Structures are given as structure tokens and as C-alpha cells.
Amino acid sequence: MTTREFCSILALTAVSTLPGLAPTSAFAQAGVGRAMAPKGKPTPRTADGKVDFSGVYSPPGRAPGDPPSKSGEGYSHNIARDLEPSDVPMQPWAKKLFHKRFDEDVSKDDPEGFCLPMGTPRMAPYPWQIVQTDKLLLMLYEGNVHGYRQIFLDGRPHDPTVKETYWGDSIGHFEGDTLVIDTVGLGFGDGRNNHSWLDADGHPRTNKLHITERLTRPELGRLVDEITIDDPGAYTKPWTVTEKSALAPGWEIQETVCNENQDANGQNQDAQHLIALPHGIGVEPQP
């Protein structure tokens, strides 16, 4: 088994294999035994005629019948799974860091493995839900730390006080049947830390990250999210991925627990087994 093959397996089971982590979820095996929405049914709409994105969805790329990716991984493991490696325009330092995280360290320092929020635009391999009103759209995630995103649809500008966060500040507007979502205030520092990655493989993100999404629902059972990643701190130019999710009729998102085995002082009791911990997590090195 090659290092890359082993890494893909480890990324799939990262939370359950890191010492002291105890995730639970009702969605243990994606795509198994789930009903699918009938094909060709019309796009649902709100009372004012806008596309209604509400519903519970399979994680992108993991519904029954979804085609395999170029890399053999899910989007949660490799956000660029449908691209050739050469199509991801990493700067030299970012490419070197990605190689270390993925090939050398086998994703052992993935922040999500420490129960940190996955952050925009990363997805977990668990169901997720959209709740939509005329002023606000919510994205609720079963996986990770049961996180959520809020996209404001009331015409407000970005909040300039939101800086260096996991989920960012998201505002949206409709262009015909497309919901355009603009997210800023993301990333942490120069991206060389382990606070937040774009995926489990370790694509870096910096505090210059700007995400633009074009969300469409061409029919009842299908959701398409075109994601443009613009991060001049780590990449030479913007690049785009397209994630497709299938409606999961009859499903509800379930409770998920991510327990990093901290003691009463907030220190990881298994820290001696872990190295290169993200700053502020586990036992800090002693002088």
C-alpha cells in the first residue's frame, strides 16, 4: 500500500483513530440504504418565486450512484478531488506544506481531528441541511462539531469586524435562479499553522481567503455548489470546484459528538502521543 493510499484511508477514519477521540453519528456509512428523490421533479420555490433550497442532503459526492472522483477521495478529504493536481495553483511554499501534511504526516495534524470547526468551504462526509427564510439561509452540519453557517439575504453589507474566523461572514443575493454567496473574514494568519485546512489532505488557507459560491437547484433532488477559492496568500490565482449533493428524503441530521479527551484543565490527556499540535491545543512544549 502506498503512502497516498494509506493517507486516503486514514483521512476517512481520522476522527475515530486519533487517540482519545470519540465521534458518534447515525450516518456511519454514506450512501447505504438511503432513498433517493425522483429524478426530473421540478425545482421547489418559495411564495415569491425564488428557488427554495431547503432540505436534508447527502454529503457531496457520496450519494448512491455518484461517480467516482479522479483521486478516489471524497470532497471532505480532497476538495480538489475532481481536478488534476496541476490544476490547483498552489504557491511553492503552499505546495511544500501540502506535501508535508499529506504525504509525510498522513494528515495526522488535521484540525478537524482535534474537534475544531471545519470552516467554509470544507464539508464533512455526513448529511447536512439547509433551512431557508426570506432574510436568512442556514446550513446545518451533522458532522464535524455540529457546526452551522448563516448566509444573510437581507441586503446587508459584510461586517468588517469579522476577521480570521472558521465560517466567515456570508451574504447572499439571487441572480435569477442562482444564489450567489460571498464569504470573507476567513482563515488564520499566513496559513502555515494548523488552525484550519481546506480539507483533510491539507490544502492550506490563509487570512486572505475569499470564497464565492454559486448555488443552484436544477431539480428537486439535486443541489449544485460552484465554489471559487480566491486566496492570494497561498495560491497564484483563483480556482473553482463544483460539489453536487443529492436530496436525502426522509432523513434528518443526527447528533454527533466529537470529544478530544481533555482533562479538567483543558489539556489533551493523550497529548504525549501527538506531535505538532495546533497552537493552544493539548500540552504546550515546556522550555
Image: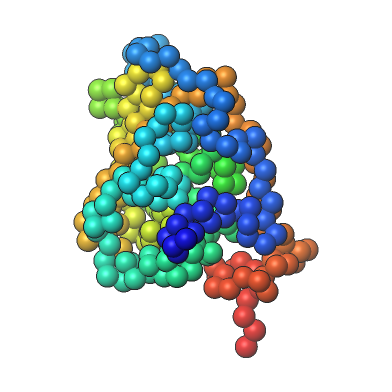
Q: Total of numbered circles in the picture?
A: 0
- Residue 55, given in percent of the width and then of the height, sits at 49, 23
Q: Residue 88, located in which quarter of the rendered image? A: bottom left
- Residue 124, given in percent of the width and then of the height, sits at 50, 44
- Residue 58, given in percent of the width and then of the height, sits at 49, 31
Tell me, what colour scheme is on the image?
rainbow
Q: Residue visible at 52% across and 20% down?
A: 35
With 79 as the anchor, is 237 left or right in this view? left
Task: Answer yes or no: is residue 31 visible.
Answer: yes
Residue in front for this viewpoint, 164 or 36:
36
Vertical side of 38 occupied by 150: above or below: below
Check the image and name the residue furthest to the bottom.
Answer: 287
Quadrant location of the C terminus in the rendered image: bottom right
Q: Residue visible at 48% across and 68% down?
A: 105
Q: Residue visible at 30% across and 63% down?
A: 234
Task: Answer yes or no: is residue 45 visible.
Answer: no
Q: Residue visible at 41% across and 54% down?
A: 198
Residue in front for this viewpoint, 261 or 48:
261
Check the image and name the residue furthest to the front.
Answer: 1
Check the image and name the residue furthest to the right.
Answer: 264
Residue in front for this viewpoint, 46 or 55:
55
- Residue 38, given in percent of the width and then of the height, sits at 42, 14
